[in-house]
């Protein structure tokens, strides 16, 4: 009982002095990995090697605990009234740009290693891409040497959910 009374006095003294940690102070900030989970929409792409803005389509990235899925489609594509299997080559090409990718990823600090599992083009499947990621509230920034030409690109995204 004596020890319980001493503990109660110490807690009261620490609380009065502001030395006792509050629930807010003891909760850890979410990790970068936890912050990046969710659905993000690309709002800007920069080619940092060339110092140029890149045109971009409607592009979305979904991050789960271990995978990323990307899907994109041009904003100005004509709406066709038939299935892709019924389109001629010109009609199929009118739907460009379009793209998709499904990656497994690992993260170490702000370094991300993404391995392409499924892509619109099998050319990219099995390739691993090294990049960096930052999250600041509802903004995610991802950088890597782009698989198309090796130029350093930066994608800026806003959280959708």
Image (tube, rainbow, N blue to C red):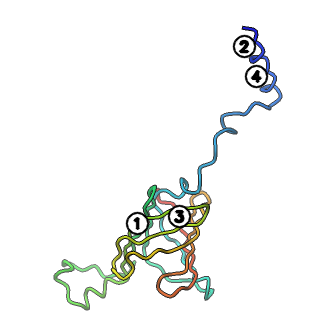
Residue 159 sits above or below residue 126 on the image: above
Estimate the spatial distance between the alpha carbons at disc 2 and disc 1, rounded to whole Å. Answer: 55 Å
- The residue most toward the left is 86
Please give left or right for residue 133 compared with residue 18 in the image.
Answer: left
Estimate the spatial distance between the alpha carbons at disc 4 and disc 3, rounded to whole Å. Answer: 44 Å
Q: Which residue is mark 1?
A: 69
Which comes before the other along the chain, label 1 or label 4? 4
* Secondary structure of residue under mark 3: strand
Q: Which residue is mark 4?
A: 11
Q: Position of residue 78 (x, y in %)?
A: 31, 82
- At x 47% / y 64%, what residue is drawn? 105
Residue 94 sits above or below residue 37 on the image: below
Residue 73: quarter of image: bottom left
Q: Which residue is mark 2?
A: 4
- At x 58% / y 61%, what residue is drawn? 108
- At x 36% / y 79%, what residue is drawn? 98
Residue 45: quarter of image: bottom right
Q: Which residue is mark 3?
A: 158
Q: Nearer the viewer, mark 1 or mark 3?
A: 1
Estimate the spatial distance between the alpha carbons at disc 1 and disc 4, rounded to whole Å. Answer: 49 Å
Q: Position of residue 115 (x, y in %)?
A: 44, 70
- At x 47% / y 59%, what residue is drawn? 160
Which comes before the other along the chain, label 2 or label 1? 2
Please give left or right for residue 115 compared with residue 2 in the image.
Answer: left
């Amino acid at each position: 009982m004596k020890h319980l009374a001493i503990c109660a006095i110490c807690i009261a003294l620490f609380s009065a002095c502001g030395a006792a940690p509050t629930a807010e102070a003891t909760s850890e900030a979410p990790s970068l990995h936890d912050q990046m989970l969710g659905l993000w929409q690309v709002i800007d792409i920069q080619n940092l090697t060339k110092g140029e803005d890149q045109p971009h389509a409607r592009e979305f990235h979904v991050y789960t605990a271990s995978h990323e899925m990307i899907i994109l489609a041009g904003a100005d594509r004509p709406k066709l009234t038939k299935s892709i299997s019924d389109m001629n080559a010109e009609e199929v090409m009118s739907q460009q740009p379009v793209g998709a990718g499904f990656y497994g990823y690992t993260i170490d600090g702000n370094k991300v290693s993404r391995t392409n599992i499924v892509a619109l083009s099998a050319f990219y499947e099995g390739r691993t891409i090294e990049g960096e990621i930052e999250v600041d509230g509802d903004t995610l920034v991802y950088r890597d040497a782009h698989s198309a030409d090796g130029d350093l690109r930066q994608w800026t995204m806003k959280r959708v959910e």
